[in-house]
Amino acid sequence: SNKYGSYFFDDEGIKAQKNLLVENGILKNFIHNRLTASELNTEPKGNGRRESYAHPLNVRMTNTYFGSGDYELDEMISEIKKGVILNRGYFGMEDPLGGGLQVTSKKGYLIENGEKTKLLKATTLSGSVLKLLKNINAISKDDLKLKPGTCGKGYEDFVPVTSGGSYIRVKTALISPG
């Protein structure tokens, strides 16, 4: 791939390769470095990365995105009685030990009876990764929206990545307005 965050080999010398994480709602793979792959008796996929040799090596994402689904975005919105649509995500983090995640968007809309009714700013979605994945009930078939960014560990050790994807509808999620 020629996306921001692409590379031929990770920082352990493992060739970078495509790694399908979830398919048809089923968790298929994880990202690994050599250590985590050996602990789980699997092959590393080229995700051992660090900002520089002055930083520790960690398991890191590369170009990570949700693929396209079967729904038109307008159709997805029209079926929502009360909910929120988030646009332009700009910050996210995960808790690998607790299984939680948090994603903040720069812009969103309140959806009522299938219509966008109010502009929302800096809205955050959070929850359990596994619960959110189980609650996906539609994915849009529009073009993928991929954006360059970074993956950091704490407030340092940033590596380039590309992330994004199609719109995803989940039945329930914790939403915090900005």
Image (spheres, grey):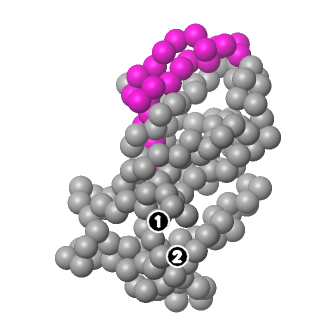
Please check the rendered image and state whether residue 72 is part of the magenta-colored stretch, yes or no. Answer: no
Residue 177 seen in render? no
Residue 35 screen position, x and y as percent? 45, 86
Left/right placement of residue 16 relative to residue 149 reads right
The chief SS type of the magenta part is: strand
Location of the N terminus by quadrant is bottom right
**Mark 1 or 2, nearer chain start:** 1
Give the magenta-colored segment's residue range: 97-124
Residue 160 versus residue 76: which sits nearer the camera? 160
Q: Residue at x 63, y 64 (%)?
A: 21
Q: Which mark is residue 16?
A: 2
Location of the C terminus by quadrant is top left
Q: Residue at x 38, y 73 (%)?
A: 49
Q: Are marks 1 and 2 in contact (CB under 8 Å)?
A: yes
Instruction: Identify the image quadrant of residue 27.
Output: bottom right
Query: Mark 1 is on which residue type?
Result: Ser
Q: Which mark is residue 6?
A: 1
What distance separates the C-alpha of mark 1 from that of mark 2? 8 Å
Instruction: Mark 2: give few (<14), some (14-19) or many (20+) Cα within 10 Å.
Output: some
Q: Residue at x 41, y 30 (%)?
A: 106
Q: Is residue 52 above or below residue 81?
A: below
Instruction: Mark 1: give few (<14), some (14-19) or many (20+) Cα within 10 Å.
Output: some
Question: Please, which residue is most extreme toward the front here?
Answer: 2
Residue 7 seen in render? yes
Query: Mark 2 is on which residue type?
Result: Ala
